[in-house]
Image: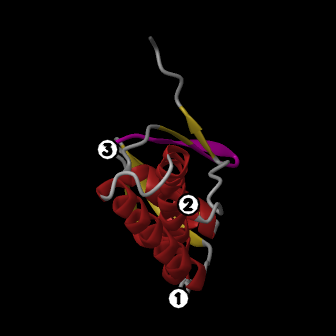
Amino acid sequence: MLPTVLFLALTLLTTAILLLFLWRAGNARALTVWLLAALLPLLAALTASLWGQDRAQRALQGYAPAPVVVDIITGKRRYRASLTALDAACLERNLRLEWEGRLSTPPWFIPIDRHSSVIGTLPPSDVVQALSVTGQLRCAAFVSHAKDE
């Protein structure tokens, strides 16, 4: 949290100095104004990235990953799947995004499409997004359908 606040303060300070130089033309050299203008988007991006990481860490504080057993309904077929906590998070994300493909759960593949539904408990979407932001969500068990073009 502290680095985020420091980067936010530095970004605001850089913005204020740049605005001051632009308002009072002639007080700074062109190179100084150019450097401040080039630095500003970089600072803003770093601040937003750190803020996203902090938010993700807060979302994951109360999350206790656990394997789940769910029923996946695709079309008129019902499949039972035992998923790891991360595969359950991937399933939640893929269903929310209406992803189409298949889930590899040995000894078979479970088809997933935009009309698929799940009976069982999946992780909340804010936890899934936090896992994605922190780089923990890999989704290796999910295979996309090849698009016909």
The amino acid type found where label 2 is placed reads Ser
Residue, disc 1: 62
- Considering only order in the chain, which callout, 2 or 3, is on the residue closer to the N terminus? 3
- Considering only order in the chain, which callout, 1 or 3, is on the residue closer to the N terminus? 1
The amino acid type found where label 3 is placed reads His
Residue at position x 57%, y 66% from top?
A: 131
Q: Main secondary structure of the magenta part?
A: strand
Expressed as whole percent of the image width and height from the top left, the position of residue 41 reads 48, 52
- Please give left or right for residue 84 compared with residue 95 in the image: right
62 or 16: nearer the viewer:
16
- Considering only order in the chain, which callout, 2 or 1, is on the residue closer to the N terminus? 1
8 or 115: nearer the viewer:
8
Query: Tag 1's secondary structure?
Result: loop
Region of the chain picked out in magenta, as a range: 103-114
Q: Nearer the viewer, mark 3 or mark 1?
A: 1
Using the image, tell me which numbered label, if any, was put on residue 115.
3
Quadrant of the rendering where the C terminus is positioned:
top left
